[in-house]
């Protein structure tokens, strides 16, 4: 399950859009990222602390659940994927 989580997050970081400072929006880290497996992933993370931490956030359009990556290995792989993301590189170097 941890490899599925890592794979989904790395794929997201390869293509995600960023703001002009190269930051990924909190709203991109929602459980729907895992598709049909979102409930299983959430349950797995509740039973295995230190992978993803879920929280509820409020925005203009209402409230939503998002997560923070806690696992160092997953965070490193996502960082490497983001550093090669064309959107990230363009936005970070545009100003």
Image (cartoon, grey):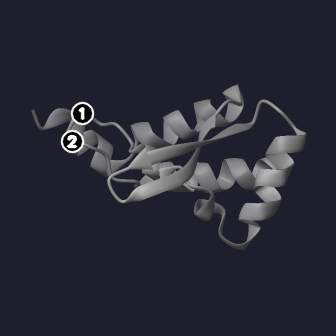
Residue 75, labelled with which disc? none
Which residue matches tag 2? 91
Outermost residue on the bottom side: it is: 36
Front residue (pair 35, 59): 59
User: Which of disc 2 and disc 1 is earlier in sequence?
Assistant: 1
Camera-side residue: 13 or 40?
40
**Between 33 and 42, the one nearer to me in the picture:** 42
Q: What is the crowding at mark 2: few (fewer than 14 residues within 10 Å), some, or many (at least 20)?
A: some
Work out how far the residue at label 1 is from the one at label 2, CA to CA, in angstroms. 6 Å
Residue drawn at the location 61% of the way across and 32% of the way down: 75
Image quadrant in which you'd find residue 32: bottom right
Q: Is residue 36 positioned above or below 38 on the image? A: below
- Total marks shown come to 2
Residue plotted at (85% across, 49% down): 44
Give neighbour class at mark 1: few <14, some 14-19, many 20+ (Cα, 10 Å). some
Q: Position of residue 52 (x, y in %)?
A: 70, 39
- In which quarter of the view is residue 4 placed? bottom right
Is mark 1 in CB contact (under 8 Å) with mark 2?
yes
The residue drawn where x is 44% and y is 43% is 26
Q: In which quarter of the view is residue 51 placed?
A: top right
The C terminus appears in which quarter of the rendering? top left
Left or right, 53 with reference to 86: right
Q: Which mark is residue 21?
A: 1
**Secondary structure beneath disc 1?**
loop
Horizontal and vertical percent position of residue 20: 20, 39
């Amino acid at each position: 399950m941890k490899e599925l989580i890592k794979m989904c997050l790395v794929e997201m970081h390869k293509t995600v859009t960023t703001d002009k400072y190269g930051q990924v929006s909190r709203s991109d880290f929602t459980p729907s990222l895992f598709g049909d497996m979102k409930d299983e992933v959430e349950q797995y993370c509740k039973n295995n602390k230190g992978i993803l931490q879920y929280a509820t956030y409020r925005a203009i359009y209402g409230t939503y659940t998002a997560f923070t990556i806690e696992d160092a290995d997953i965070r490193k792989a996502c960082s490497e994927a983001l550093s090669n993301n064309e959107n990230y590189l363009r936005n970070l170097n545009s100003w």
